[in-house]
Image: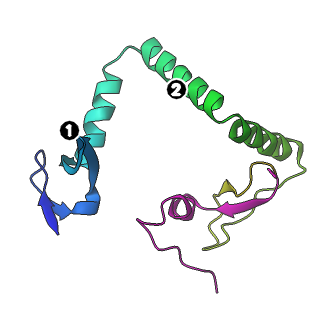
Amino acid sequence: MLKSCYICKEKKEESEFYRQKVHGKERIASRCKTCNNKKSNARMMSLPVEKRRSLWREATKRTQERYPEKTLARLQVHEALRKGTLTRKDCEVCGEEKTQSHLYDYNKPLKIRWLCQLHHRMTHYPDNYQLPTRS
């Protein structure tokens, strides 16, 4: 089903809009994701550099406190890459050279699946994408 964006006036699929909860009811936002992101970026860029840095540090600290096992696993992967005990490989799905590490189990941080940004995103958001398999 198509919906019109309040800002750019383009008709887009509902998947191009964020979902919001208003008064306990879920609804589709009036701005498309693209317009919403532009507005958010403009708001952040209007802040002084030091304010943006402090907001980034606070968000990072909250994430690290909330998910200590994820933080530790990421650090172990980065350390192994730095030392050379772990080497970055091509995407397992499409063969792209520029890859990201995908951890299935934070208790086994060096058991990694190497994926390009697109396929990594597909792994985390399967409802929005259909992950193709490598033949």
Q: Name the residue located 25 percent from the left edge and 42 percent from the top edge.
A: 24
Inspect this view and state whether residue 33 appears.
no
Q: Name the residue located 38 percent from the left edge and 13 percent from the top edge.
A: 48
The CA span between labels 1 and 2 is 27 Å
Q: In this image, 69 relative to 50: left or right? A: right
Q: In front: mark 1 or mark 2?
A: 1
Whether residue 129 appears in magenta in the rendering, the answer is yes
Q: In this image, 101 relative to 82: left or right? A: left
User: Residue 84 at what x, y percent from top left?
Assistant: 88, 48
Whether residue 13 appears in magenta in the rendering, the answer is no
Query: Which span is picked out in magenta?
Result: 108-135
Figure quadrant of residue 127 = bottom left
User: Residue 62 at what x, y percent from top left?
Assistant: 57, 26
**Residue closer to the observer: 79 or 105:** 105
The quarter of the picture where the N terminus appears is bottom left
User: Residue 32 at what x, y percent from top left?
Assistant: 22, 50
Whether 70 is drawn above or below 50: the answer is: below
Q: Name the residue located 81 percent from the left edge and 41 percent from the top edge.
A: 76
Residue type, numbered disc 1: His
Q: Name the residue located 85 percent from the left edge and 53 percent from the top edge.
A: 86
Indicate which disc residue 11 carries.
none
The quarter of the picture where the C terminus appears is bottom right
Residue type, numbered disc 2: Ala
Inspect this view and state whether residue 103 appears.
yes
Per the image, label 2 sits on a secondary structure element best described as helix
Indicate which disc residue 59 carries.
2
Residue with the mark numbered 1: 23
